[in-house]
Image (cartoon, rainbow, N blue to C red):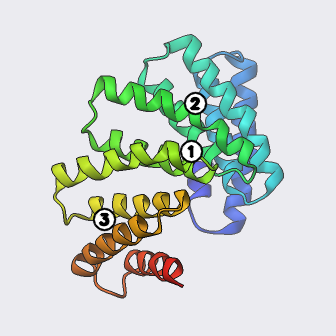
Amino acid sequence: ADYLEKTGDPADFAAARPLYERALAISEQELGPMHLDTSTSLSNLADYLEKTGDPADFAAARPLYERSLAISEQELGPMHPDTFTSLIGIASYLDKAADPTDQAAAHPFYQRVLARLEETVGPDDQETLRIKQKFALSLRKTGRADDALPLIHDVVDRQSRLTGGNSLKTASALSALGATLQATGDRSGAEDAYRNALAIHLEKLGPDDPATQLVQGRLDDLLA
């Protein structure tokens, strides 16, 4: 099923579905609904359904992700790496939902992931900063730009210190800061952040790179 999903052929992708469903049914019947292999099968099917592009399939993925997480928490505990992976998976899934209520439901999961990362690998770890930036973006998308602002400011400050003031990671954080400041109504601050991000992209990637053009587009929209 995993192979068929990744061939790039739409027919193969469609053919993977019954295999994922069959694998889950076998796990539930032979191993039980709370077995760790059942958790894996639930997660695999949920990931597949998330990718089909069908809103009904996307909605159907949520209870599968939730069941998978519940099994990991019960059988492995809240601090196990597999539980952590499940937390990230459901947070990212909810973040992609069309309904703002579902998007907001991702926030507690991001908070749990972020707390775990800060405790285990520290606030300067790149994975911690990646999740913090995703959490800030999620907050901004759901109308909580003021809450997102200290998070993204922290990411900018740490990336500047850790990777350099002209690194692409700093540029990414600056672009996110610009969008967040724009959402709070701070147009001047947003313009400065976008211009700083754009300068880095132009230096590192050139004017024709999609990432450069994305920042340029945000700045143009702000100034229009």
Q: Nearer the viewer, residue 187 or 108?
A: 187
Residue 113 placement (x, y as % from top left) = 46, 31
Up/down of 125 relative to 13, above or below: above
Question: N-terminal of the two: label 2 or label 1?
Answer: 1
Q: State how far apart marks 1 and 3 are (Cα).
A: 22 Å
In this view, the mark in front (2 or 1): 2
Residue 175 placement (x, y as % from top left) = 39, 65
Which residue bears the numbered disc 2? 108
Q: State how far apart marks 2 and 3 are (Cα).
A: 27 Å
Which residue bears the numbered disc 1? 92
Residue 215 placement (x, y as % from top left) = 42, 75
Image quarter of the C terminus: bottom right
Labels 2 and 3 touching (C-beta < 8 A): no
Q: State how far apart marks 2 and 1 are (Cα).
A: 12 Å
Which residue bears the numbered disc 3? 171
Residue 164 placement (x, y as % from top left) = 16, 58
The quarter holding residue 27 reads top right
Give, as a three-letter code, the residue at label 2.
Pro
The residue that appears at 28% across and 34% down in the rendered structure is 123
